[in-house]
Amino acid sequence: MTSRWVSYALSAFVLHATIAAIDPAAVNNPLQGDLADGAKGAGVVRAQILLGRAHFSCGEIDGTFGSNFQKALNAFQGERKLPVTGALDAATWSALHRDTAPALINYTIKAMDLKGPFAPTPAGMEAQAKLTYLGYDSPLEELGERFHSSPELLQALNPGANFEQAGQQLTVPNVHVVPRPRAGSIVVSKSESSVRAYDASGRLLAFFAATIGSEHDPLPIGEWKIKRVFHNPKFYYDATLFWNAKGSDKEVLPPGPNNPVGPVWIDLSREHYGIHGTPEPGKVGHASSHGCIRLTNWDALVLAAMVRPGTRATLKE
């Protein structure tokens, strides 16, 4: 594969905060009150899960009513012809509760979940290029990604659980969704920090919170097309293509979920630009990128299954 992909994250300093224990029964309870920006806890977890199952992804489920959740909520309210209040009100809960499946389900850690290999990702391109695979750091990170959650949320739902023990019973977000049909077009919005997928008639199929461009590497506004989708891509690093890199180093990084572009690269007709995953889902929507469009790994895989070569991609302010 010869494409040179320019999208490695400019890392904003974002850390997950420790989350207090969350009662699973409170998350599964459909009787919820109004919630607004800044809210935390069981009600927000429930809403994040239900929005994701309705194909309005706020990225990582973390139990916090923040900017990504606000974007997904606004998009859901607009698409459902509800007042776009920016709050979780009774009308919005009613629309979300048309999905009656439980928000949380039980899961038992299997021996296969612990197979790995697991190892911390080394700092620096040169060190990463020496590896054969950029896998998960730990079973907890892998399970967090599988259930679209921050590791801290899984710990809050399962206080005292051993995430490295086969047979351990867990309570996890029920993130199963029916696959979306093929998209006729996608729209990337810089102002909204989002990617929307539409069918051929213009009906909204899915919404994804995203990280889009930066001051130094702005989003290439215009009409483009999807050229191709690469699964399990290598990452071709060229320091001369990064404004903040020193020297002229070139490295080829191996594939894996902690590869700088995650498990999939959706190549755009604008050279060097694409839509892709990330090794740091908690930074989606909060950090900047080198001009490309970054989604969580799970959202990038969903979008990749919806597009084909030739799908129209509109990149706008």
Image (tube, rainbow, N blue to C red):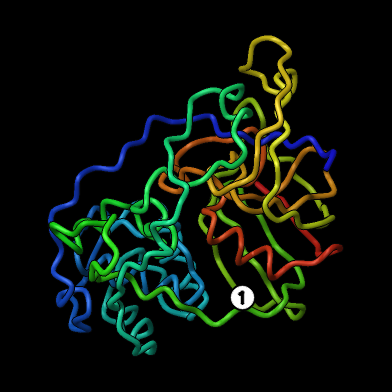
Q: Position of residue 138 (x, y in %)?
A: 37, 47
Q: Position of residue 275 (x, y in %)?
A: 67, 50
Q: Quadrant of the N terminus?
A: top right
Pick whichever, 269 or 71, lies toward us. 269
Packing grade of label 1 (10 A; few <14, some 14-19, many >=20) is many
Please give the name of the residue rendered at 21% of the width and 71% of the height, measured from the top-left corner: 34
Please give the name of the residue rendered at 28% of the width and 72% of the height, measured from the top-left corner: 46
The tally of labels here is: 1
Please give the name of the residue rendered at 64% of the width and 25% of the height, measured from the top-left corner: 216
SS of the residue at dot 1?
A: strand
Q: Is residue 2 left or right of residue 288?
A: right
Amino acid bearing label 1: Leu
Q: Is residue 115 left or right of residue 238?
A: left
Q: Is residue 182 left or right of residue 169?
A: right
Q: Is residue 216 left or right of residue 160?
A: right
Pick whichever, 160 or 13, lies toward us. 160
Q: Is residue 69 visible?
A: no
Q: Position of residue 173 (x, y in %)?
A: 33, 71
Please give the name of the residue rendered at 31% of the width and 74% of the height, measured from the top-left corner: 107
- Quadrant of residue 95 in the image? bottom left
Q: Is residue 270 visible?
A: yes
Q: Position of residue 185 (x, y in %)?
A: 75, 67
Q: Is residue 150 above or below residue 10?
A: below
Q: Which residue is mark 1?
A: 205
